[in-house]
Amino acid sequence: MNPPGPMSTPASRERWHRRPIELLAFAAWLVLASQVGDCYPFGNFRFFSVKMDTASRVLARDVDGRLHEPMAFDQWHCDRPISSLASPDKTSLVYMARHVGAAGQGQPLELLQRTWRFSAGVDEPEVTDEPLTRCTASPAAGSDQFFLWQRY
C-alpha cells in the first residue's frame, strides 16, 4: 500500500499531468494579450485605468429638440453616408449602418456628436454639440425603453 501523497490517487495524478497544458495555455494567453491591445478578453482596458477628461456619444435630435439614442430608431437614411461620419462612438454608427432605410421615410432628425468635458473642481461638465448630418428614421419597435437625454 502506498503512503498518502500528491500522486496517490488517479485524480491527483491526472491533475499533475494537465499542469503543462495549463501552463502552456496561460503562456499563449499572455502572448496574445501583449499583441492584440484593448480587445476582450485580452486587453488591459485603459478606460478603467486612465482618467478621462472627455466623453462623447452620437445622439439624434428630433424636431421638438429632444435627444434620443440612435438605437431608438430604425430605417436610417442620412444626407451623408454613415460610413463617412467620424466619431469615437462606433457602436451607434454600426447600428445605423445595419438599419438603413429608404429616403424620405420616417421623421426628420439631426445627428450630432455630444461631448462632455470634465474639469477638476467643477461639478457640471461643459457640453458641446457638433452637428454630423441630417437624417430621417422611423421609431424602432420598443423604442420607448431607450433613455431620452434631457438633463445634459
Image (spheres, grey):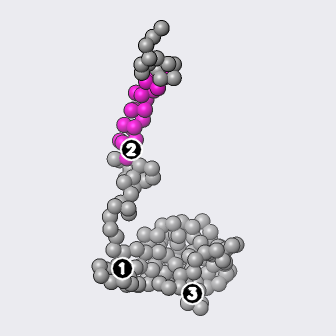
Magenta region's main secondary structure?
helix
**Rendered view: 93 above or below 152:** above
Choose the circle earlier in sequence order: 3 or 2. 2
Q: Which mark is residue 66?
A: 3
In the figure, residue 142 lies in which quadrant? bottom right
In the figure, is residue 81 to the left or right of 124?
right
User: What residue range appears in magenta?
Assistant: 14-33
**Residue at position x 58%, y 84% from top?**
109
Residue 133, percent from left and from top: 51, 81
**Residue at position x 52%, y 69% from top?**
93
The verdict on residue 1 being magenta is no
Residue 52, percent from left and from top: 34, 70
Pointer 1 residue? 117
**Residue at position x 68%, y 80% from top?**
105
Near-viewer residue (129 or 102):
129
Element marked by disc 3: loop
Q: What is the crowding at mark 3: few (fewer than 14 residues within 10 Å), some, or many (at least 20)?
A: few
Pointer 2 residue? 32
Please identify the residue farthest to the left as the structure is shown.
120
Q: What is the crowding at mark 2: few (fewer than 14 residues within 10 Å), some, or many (at least 20)?
A: some
The residues bearing labels 2 and 1 have C-alpha atoms spaced at a distance of: 34 Å
In the figure, residue 65 lies in which quadrant? bottom right
Q: Is residue 79 visible?
A: no
* Type of amino acid at the residue the image marks with label 3: Arg
Please identify the residue farthest to the bottom as the structure is shown.
64
Residue 55, percent from left and from top: 40, 74
* Type of amino acid at the residue the image marks with label 1: Arg
Instruction: State yes or no: discs 2 and 1 in contact (Cβ < 8 Å).
Output: no
